[in-house]
Image (cartoon, rainbow, N blue to C red):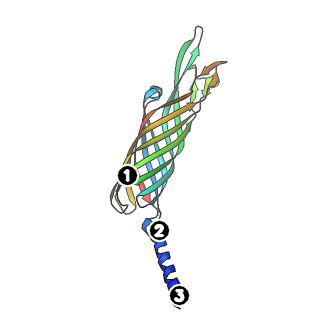
Amino acid sequence: MTRALLLATTAIALSTVAAQPLRAQGPIRLSFQAAGLYQRLTGNLKSQTGPGLGYEAQARFARQTWSLGIGVDYLRHERTLATFQGSPPTIIVRSADANFLGAFAEPRMEFSDRDRSIRPYLMVRVGWGRATPRIDVDGSGVEEDFVESPVTSFTWNGGLGLAVRVARLLTVDAGVTMGLVRWTGRDDPALGGVTLGNGTTSTGNMMARVGVSFGALP
């Protein structure tokens, strides 16, 4: 009897210790966020496109001070390319809308407990996007002279943000990140042998976001 009681007591103690970290972590919380975006590029890409505006939507899974957001975003930029035309060759510069549709992952570490109304946080953002601008090579407006010039983007950013709860399940969120962005284009033939030169360009970027978050699981 004593041995059985000892074994039972030990089993209860071990199960209590094993369960303690799970209770300390707390339940996983789910929220959905919608936000407006602003992105400015530097270096070589600054000469190819101006600042871009867009928006994002994400689902965020949180536990205590850590969370992970996964979502999609849309950013409007321009794509500027040069063609060589005539004899002797003349450089002709053309631009077209390059609207990037992509996906991203964004882990965060908050500097305060999630029960607080004001919560600053540190974040890392990794994103991929693709755009297919149609460029009027010679400016004629004729459909046959338009060339599709697909371009992909890959972004690594890090920065700071602030979440402010305004209601029980409603939070206003703002953040700024900086990092690197890489655009990769594909060479396409145009006008019977003239080639649009794209290649890969890497440069810096800054992105700002303001949005609202709706808690699904408090």
Above-or-below relation of 85 to 147: above
Q: Dot 2 surroundings within 10 Å: few (below 14), some, or many (20 or more)?
A: few
Q: Residue furthest bottom?
A: 1
Q: Earlier in the sequence, mark 2 or mark 1?
A: 2
Query: Which residue occupies the foreground of this view, 104 or 189?
Result: 104
Quarter of the image containing the C terminus? bottom left
- Residue 22 is marked as 2
- Position in image of residue 173 (x %, y %): 38, 51
Kind of residue indicated by mark 3: Arg
Query: Which residue occupies the foreground of this view, 212 or 108?
Result: 108
In the structure shown, which secondary structural element does the residue marked by tag 3 occupy?
A: helix
- Position in image of residue 104 (x %, y %): 51, 46
Above-or-below relation of 130 to 198: below
In the structure shown, which secondary structural element does the residue marked by tag 2 occupy?
A: helix
Q: Dot 1 surroundings within 10 Å: few (below 14), some, or many (20 or more)?
A: some
Give the CA separation, mark 2 to mark 1: 23 Å
Give the CA separation, mark 2 to mark 3: 30 Å
Q: Earlier in the sequence, mark 3 or mark 1?
A: 3
Is 173 on the left-hand or right-hand side of 95? left
Instruction: Give the residue at x 57% y 15%.
Output: 84
Give the CA separation, mark 3 to mark 1: 52 Å
Kindly identify which residue carries mark 3: 3
Instruction: Give the residue at x 45% y 59%.
Output: 62
Question: Mark 3 or mark 1, which is nearer to you?
Answer: 3
- Residue 121 is marked as 1
